Amino acid sequence: MRSANPKAGRHQHGPAAYPVEDLRKAEQQVMATLPEGALMQRAAAGLAVSCARVLRERTGGVSGRRAVLLVGPGDNGGDALYAGVRLVGRGVAVTALLTSEKVHGAGIHALAAAGGRCVEVGPETAVEAWTHLEAADLVVDGLLGLGGRPGLREPAAGLVDRIPDHAAVVAVDLPSGVDPDTGATGSSHVWADLTVTFGAAKACLLLPPASAAVGDLEIVDIGLTPHLPHEPLVRRLAAADVARLWPVPPPSADKYRRGVLGVVAGSAGYPGAAVLAVAGALRTGVGMIRYVGPKDATAAVRSAWPEVVAGPGRVQAWLLGSGVVPEANDDQPEAIHTALESGQPCLLDAGALGLFPEELRAHTDSSGGVPDRSDRLLLTPHAGELARLLTELGEEVHREEVEVQPYRHAHAAARLTGATVLLKGSTTLVVRPDGHARSQAEAPSWLATAGAGDVLAGIAGALLASGLSPFDAGSVAAYVHGKAAGRASGGGPITSMDVAEQVSSTVAGLLRH
């Protein structure tokens, strides 16, 4: 077994995100200790500082620039209005476009008194509103907040559609038009360059697909942290977190203590999947690999990696299914069944996922409930595989539905199987049956290439064999996989083997810092 990295823990950790219910409770506790309106003024002050910085970075200055506030009902609109007051004080020409009759009255009066302009958006003022938008250097999105739902209605949707490309967009708390708790988006929502959120990140800021609309994320401290739960709903690991979790071999380690990974992968049609999965595992630092597969795949693995031991034996964890075809006339399905029966931690990928529903039905407890397997099993589907798995488990789902609400469906799969689920995508989610999740988005778009998932499975399998829990192994693997892809790419195309070859140096860089 490896020890924790002694240098870890000195740097900033990744953001933590919470559901609406937890944030509202924390806000109420803080407001009870403050004068009325003080919490909003704290938020507006931080928002104004960020807006001024964005103007300076994008246009070279603050005074003389034009800002448009998109103001809806609720406190986010109030935050935007009071931030506008502060921007007027710095010489910014501020216009607030009011999209509702229920906007923050005191904020409107404060902005007007400071010298800002307010326009109620309607049929008679639409052209005026569009004119202000077209001339804006900065657009501040204060349309919807924690009470928002996916999609925008008119007139907000029309205004968002007319935001000019040259304008910087700063979202207040979250991009309007996304679901705060699930990250689901509608047909119309804000795409921000920067999201300034208050107290703590909202779950949607880390959950796809909404997380793609966040831009840069900045969290303004308004005193909520002491009142929030110890464990957030979603966390994104940063370099310091990964370094802290990484299992470093102690001086006394031998290959067995470093972890032995059993790999059931590949088939006559897909021998390369086995080669890539083994490559990811070896580059991660597993002590030894025992490979189980058909003759041609075994030959390909042994040719690429002569240190691999062919045949079953004692292992600390199993990687199952990459490149396996359940319908093929080989012994791979039986080998997967034997590994699952072993009681060892198992990662189920690709072909193993297709065999899993039958295994589940055979091992459901006598009450019909689902036993908690999250400390032993890690499932690694992409959206299509997750849809098929859910459908096999009795919840008919299509791939497109998974892509629209990935967190919801990954959580459903975790609950129905009792396993930890890693849903692959441009943002990778790792979700436990209790709903707690990690969200990693380090990978470049070039990583969408054949075999990338096999390398990821190898990395995560090696970490399982080294003693990490499925939750930690999946999220740490997703981080390293994405960073290795970035190193391999350098801004250009990559192959999956390019990614595997960068894993060792990526880990070394993490542990040095």
Image (cartoon, helix red, strand yellow):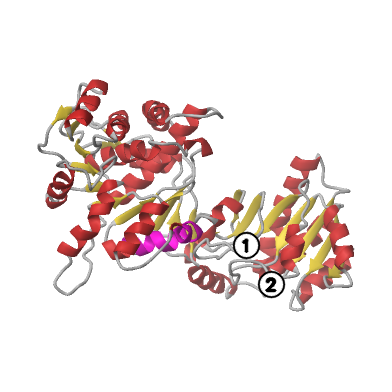
Image height of 122 relative to 54, above or below: below
Q: Amino acid at mark 1?
A: Ser
Residue 233 x/y as whole percent:
43, 61
Residue nearer the viewer, 227 or 88: 88
Q: Which residues are magenta?
A: 400-414
Disc 2 on helix, strand or loop?
A: loop
Disc 1 residue crowd, few under 14, some 14–19, many 20+, Cα 10 Å? few
Does the magenta stretch mainly form a helix, a strand or a loop?
helix
Give the side of residue 457 with respect to residue 75, left or right. Answer: left
Q: Marks 2 and 1, how far apart in space?
A: 34 Å
Q: Which residue is mark 1?
A: 187
Residue nearer the viewer, 159 or 103: 159
Q: In which quarter of the view is residue 358 placed?
A: bottom left
Q: Nearer the viewer, mark 2 or mark 1?
A: 1
Q: Residue furthest bottom?
A: 101
Residue 343 x/y as whole percent:
14, 51
